Image (cartoon, helix red, strand yellow):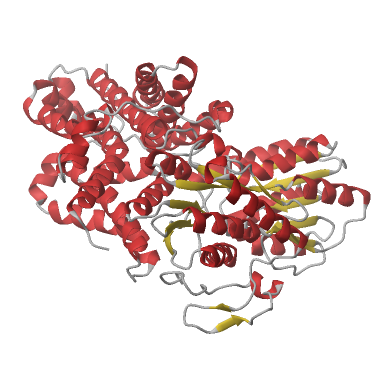
Amino acid sequence: MYKYFLRLLALVLLLLGFSMNANAEFKVGFVYVGPTGDHGWTYQHDEGRKAVEAAGIKTTYVESVPEGADAERVIRQLAQSGHDLIFTTSFGYMDPTNKVAKDFPNVKFEHATGYKREHSNVSTYSARFYEGRTLLGHMAGKMTKTNVIGYIASFPIPEVIRGINAMTLAAQKVNPNIKTKIVWVFTWYDPGKESEAAQALIDQGADIIMQHTDSTAPVQVAEKAGVWSFGQASDMQRFAPKSILTSIIDDWAPYYVERSIAARDGTWKQQDTWHGLKEGMVAMAPYNSAMGSGLVKEVEKLQKDLASGKAHSFTGPIYDQKGNLLVAKGKVADDGMLAGMSVYVKGVEGDIPK
Amino acid sequence: MNIDINFLGILIGAIMASSVPLILAASGELITERSGVLNLGVEGMMIIGAISGFALMVITDNLFLAIIGSMLSGLLLSFIFGFLTQSLLTNHVASGLALTIFGIGLSAMIGKDFVGIPGKEFPLLFVNLKEAIPLFGPIFFGHSIVFYFAFLLPFGTNYFLRKTKIGLIVRAVGDSPVSAANQGINVLLVRYCCILYGGAMCGLGGAYLSLIYTPQWIENMTAGRGWIALALVVFATWSPLKVLAGAIIFGGITILQLHMQAMGIRIPVQFLSALPYIMTIVVLVIISRDSRKIKLNTPTSLGQIFYKEK
């Protein structure tokens, strides 16, 4: 209920704000799923927005917009109020973005982590976070003593499943005995629930905590309990100085600046971007020296190989939980398969919630 | 996975710790509602308590001041509500909703500069006893002072409402403000006090989150707990001890379902996620079936505007 009121308020403010200066100036709009102060996913997108602003382009943003039908109103509002390019930064904005794009052929849309480009003015972009997960898996496999890796998952979408699989495969490679325990919290962002999930996993023997949620709560719980953890989306080292091994960092800034300038100068074209370690859209925070210089060197080398293409996160043979062959020996998974990934690989416990 | 006795102790301890914010906020709101005032601003007062506590901790480096400050800020916010509904006679529901929206927005604005700062270690009591006693150690010891306060509060509230004269006055005001006024009770004063007390407890509940439970500030970190607290009060039929039971059941099933997932028990996860809400309602409805008692506990004038003719 209160969220509804918040949205209403946001819309009214937007209306007021934009009706007053509906001139022809080039503007870029951003729609965020969380608050800019989450210090995770949305925070990093907002860092990207600030880079666009620094490049001399006017931007606006709407934060904490729930996924689904209500997102459509916010996106439509941005389009109506004279924004020329709109970034919608969460998976659940996929259909609303395409719907609005149909009605505003002159406005450009960029949707993060989705795969639908139903109209020529919609581009999609995402980062190969799974490359980072591979590095995490390698470290986790080497660092665990209990052989139990705890994984806090948000929603059962390909993006999240891909991360679980990439991590498990890499960990199995260095430690065949590891088990991945997964807890689904069905939220991107609830510090209390995330920390309870972390605690549950630790209580059940996990000595590595990994998260695909956005708050810093899990790494703090890990720090208190004295187990290793990994940060998500931004460098969370400050919250767990002793126990965090590294963080996967999303760096959207170069992409946002490039696309905004292209749209302003009229060179924007529809495309599907999937950048990773190579292009720097996925970056790693400094590695914790507590894991020993030998392991740090190993991981740095693996990072280099992933970036150069010498190594791939999904190299065959890969089997699913039932033992069906997914990727043949010597082959790597293609992007189509990665984008639609909806089964666990062998070695992951439990079922994917349907 | 074999469940040993120590694990059980840790589990129960975790469950109790997670229900603390709900107990605090719901106990406070219970008093407010017993005086006949429906304040839907619980979430807003909690989040304001969370940010004020955290900000004061960062600025003064003093946890005692932070806790007191969080209660004062919750109190201050509830004063706005009290002024609107009691002195200006506005609608309770609308004012309460506005209070929540205002609280969330204001906390986000104040909080801008406090994002990304790690919290401070909160002192825990009886830590050595926690290790020493099996099962009961992790349940009863090694918690913060706020934890113990929260678990005593429902009993205190119960005693206050049933056995003390002021408690009787509060109930009288909630049941029939007109008769109470005719008896010479200052209805306005009683209601103001109850509103302010509710605000302070909600503020403390928020501060428990930002200072002790997940020591950090993040926007919207109460994540709907205020609404759960509100629902608890109603489903517990305004009885403090049932509020306590409800809060523990809610916290317990939330944590148990996470454990069940981690154990790989094959029950649909969506069902497990919904379970805390369902079970809390079911249990509270079952334990409060006695309609005579419900009638006794329900503040008859809840949410109605009281206007004393002069």
Inspect this view and state whether residue B198 appears: yes
Residue at 58%, 37% (x, y): give it.
Answer: A37
Q: Is residue B8 left or right of residue A223?
A: left
* In the image, farthest residue toward the bottom: A324
Inspect this view and state whether residue B36 appears: no
> Considering depth in this image, is B20 or B144 the residue closer to the camera?
B144
Residue at 40%, 50% (x, y): give it.
Answer: A198
**Where in the figure is residue B67, as x and y percent of width and height?**
35, 22
Where is B126 relative to B240, above or below?
above
Where is A4 relative to B309, above or below?
below
Q: Is residue A224 left or right of residue B126?
A: right
* In the image, farthest residue toward the front: A294
Residue B21 lies in quadrant: top left
Q: What is the number of callouts on the image?
A: 0
> Considering depth in this image, is A11 or A339 the residue closer to the camera?
A339
> Considering depth in this image, is B205 or A199 the residue closer to the camera?
A199
Residue at 64%, 82% (x, y): give it.
Answer: A328
**Where in the figure is residue B178, as x and y percent of width and height?**
19, 27
**Where in the figure is residue A250, as x and y percent of width and height?**
67, 49
Q: Is residue A12 left or right of residue A142?
A: right
Where is B298 relative to B168, above or below?
below
Residue at 17%, 26% (x, y): give it.
Answer: B170
**Where in the figure is residue B125, as x and y percent of width and height?**
24, 28
Where is A200 relative to A98, above or below?
above
